[in-house]
Amino acid sequence: MPVSSTADEQPADDVDGATLPVNELFYPLQGEGKLTGAPSVFVRTSGCNLRCWFYDSYHTSWEPTHAIMSVDDIVEEVQSHDDAGHVVLTGGEPLIHDDAVTLLEQLDDLGYHTTVETNGTIHLDAPIDLESISPKLASSTPTPEKDPKGDGEWADRHEERRIDLDTLGALVDDYNAQLKFVVTGPDDLPEIESLLADVRSTAASRIPDSDVLLMPEGATRDELDARRNEVAELAMEYGYRYTPRLHVDLWNDAPET
């Protein structure tokens, strides 16, 4: 099991300097994307500007919970994991927090490789080694029948905000990026193809198919088992890269993985 740390609950005005709302700070393996298998410290912030119905981190979006931590304390906790050279800033949507830049700058100064996991709707100027962009497809929209809270009030807001082509193009141009799509089934592929064409026409940089990753939706082993082979076959059919959810394979739906 991964090593974990939980911050003490404290109000923001009791913490000096730059702060972030931290839901979890833990040390597992990176489970997704090009760096799958790399031991990494995860800093999971709370809060998101979207509401995917299938969020595996429910308590960073639908029912946000967190402690307020100073950036200095976060960096100190990261440094306590002596063998970790990679840090992943994730959420929720970590880039809704301006002080994420301060954290990324300090980690960069210390020589850490940083990955930011983002939905691709926000661009901040920060030192980021890998921008892991996960544009949200129409299948992510929390329609009333899929809304985990049962009311569907977020459906319109999510649908309006989930794609920002100008921001996606800027992120691809400004950072080493991977585009990671959560796939619920074959019906998602026409939208992925169309969105990729739009991003490629917006960005000045070339986006090779090897930077496009298809990942099966699922927060448990059973859910992944139902989609894994199908999504792998879709990756082969379309020439994209398949990415597992290694942390789910190893630890199922345990917290802090």
Image (cartoon, helix red, strand yellow):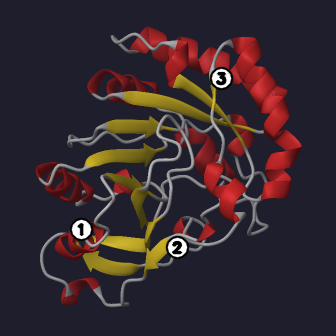
Q: Alpha carbon of mark 3 to alpha carbon of mark 1: how far?
A: 38 Å
Residue that appears at 37% across and 84% down: 7
In the image, 77 versus 207, the foreground residue is: 77
Image quadrant of residue 253?
bottom right
Earlier residue among tags 3 and 1: 1
Residue that appears at 27% across and 41% down: 128
- For label 3, count other residues whose C-alpha is less than 10 Å away and answer few (under 14), some (14-19) or many (20+): many
Label 3's element?
A: helix
Q: What is the three-letter code of the residue carrying label 3?
A: Ile
In the image, residue 180 lies at what x, y percent? 56, 34
| Residue 124 in view (yes/no) | yes
What residue would you read off at disc 1? 79
| Residue 144 in view (yes/no) | no
Label 2's element?
A: loop
Question: Disc 3 or disc 1, which is closer to the eye?
Answer: 1
What residue would you read off at disc 3? 192
The quadrant of the rendering that contains the N terminus is bottom right
In the image, residue 159 lies at what x, y percent? 62, 41
In the image, residue 210 lies at what x, y percent? 53, 18
In the image, residue 34 lies at what x, y percent? 49, 34
What residue would you read off at disc 2? 64
Q: Alpha carbon of mark 2 to alpha carbon of mark 3: how far?
A: 29 Å
Q: What is the three-letter code of the residue carrying label 2?
A: Pro
The quadrant of the rendering that contains the C terminus is bottom right
Is label 2 in contact with label 1 (beta carbons under 8 Å)?
Answer: no
Q: What is the three-letter code of the residue carrying label 1?
A: Gln
Is label 3 in contact with label 1 (beta carbons under 8 Å)?
Answer: no
**224 to the left or right of 57:** right
- For label 2, count other residues whose C-alpha is less than 10 Å away and answer few (under 14), some (14-19) or many (20+): some
**132 to the left or right of 102:** right
Question: Disc 2 or disc 1, which is closer to the eye?
Answer: 1
Earlier residue among tags 2 and 1: 2
